[in-house]
Image: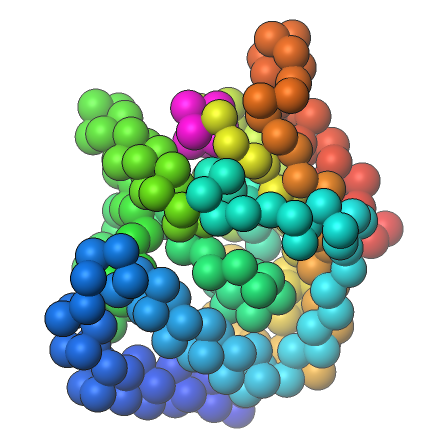
């Protein structure tokens, strides 16, 4: 309970601070620069949340050279498994590229969070309305093509069991329509920090993030593209600690 209170207080105070003292300045920046500045602030916030939760974070790269060769204007879509609300600050902390997220529509009503998601060019996806969902994906494609890396959770929701669920093929439209780079990401351990069964946060847990080898969609064939959701899921699953 103490860790939950500490993390909540850290998030609340930091969101309040950046909203009062940073938001106005960012809103006055150019439309190209503002999202990057907003993402910088959210990275600082994420690092503080990870620290407050006392997460022992380890980041491993399967091909660090290929990762470092990626350029933002390549059109980067990060694909990750989803086990916890803490996956978002863990991903932002682990990666040194300025990522945004595709989030569920309900989060658009969250105080502070919603405004900063919009400032950083994140996308809210309404899964209950297919027509609006298509519009959101098209908007996200344009954002990725403009050089703003975006994270998707193709399971659609946090796992209940700790096991990686099926990846929805529709989630991969963002990647296939961007025709850029998929960066597979395996998150291992956040389920034991906090999960859907409890709001409580368990401190002093190890979390391992494995950054997979980037997949250049321009270099895969038609058959490979048809099985993209299954093949990426296998890549992520195979790097999960048994």
Q: Is residue 50 left or right of residue 236?
A: left
Q: Is residue 44 above or below residue 242?
A: below
What secondary structure prevails in the magenta region? helix
Toward the viewer: 42 or 52? 42
The magenta stretch spans residue 212: no
Picture quadrant where residue 37 is located: bottom left
Toward the viewer: 140 or 161? 140
Picture quadrant where residue 208 is located: bottom right
Residue at the image position 47 percent from the left and 90 percent from the top: 6
Residue at the image position 74 percent from the left and 69 percent from the top: 58
Residue at the image position 56 percent from the left and 35 percent from the top: 181
Q: Is residue 45 above or below residue 61?
A: below
State which region is magenta: 171-178
Residue 234 visible in the snapshot: yes
Q: Position of residue 184 (x, y in %)?
A: 64, 42
Colouring of the image: rainbow
């Amino acid at each position: 309970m103490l860790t939950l209170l500490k993390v909540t207080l850290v998030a609340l105070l930091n969101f309040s601070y950046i909203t009062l003292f940073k938001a106005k300045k960012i809103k006055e920046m150019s439309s190209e620069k503002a999202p990057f500045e907003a993402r910088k602030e959210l990275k600082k916030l994420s690092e503080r949340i990870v620290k407050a939760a006392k997460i022992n974070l380890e980041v491993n790269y399967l091909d660090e050279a290929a990762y470092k060769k990626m350029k933002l204007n390549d059109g980067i879509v990060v694909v990750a498994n989803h086990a916890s609300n803490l996956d978002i600050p863990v991903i932002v902390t682990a990666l040194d590229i300025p990522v945004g997220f595709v989030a569920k529509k309900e989060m658009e009503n969250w105080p502070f969070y919603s405004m900063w998601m919009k400032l950083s060019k994140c996308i809210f996806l309404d899964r209950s309305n297919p027509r609006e969902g298509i519009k959101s994906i098209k908007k996200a494609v344009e954002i990725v093509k403009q050089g703003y890396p975006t994270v998707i959770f193709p399971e659609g929701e946090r796992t209940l069991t700790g096991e990686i669920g099926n990846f929805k093929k529709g989630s991969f439209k963002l990647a296939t329509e961007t025709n850029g780079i998929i960066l597979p990401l395996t998150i291992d351990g956040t389920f034991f920090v906090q999960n859907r069964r409890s709001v409580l946060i368990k401190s002093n847990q190890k979390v391992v993030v494995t950054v997979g080898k980037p997949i250049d969609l321009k270099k895969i064939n038609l058959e490979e593209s048809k099985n993209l959701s299954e093949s990426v899921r296998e890549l992520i699953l195979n790097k999960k600690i048994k």
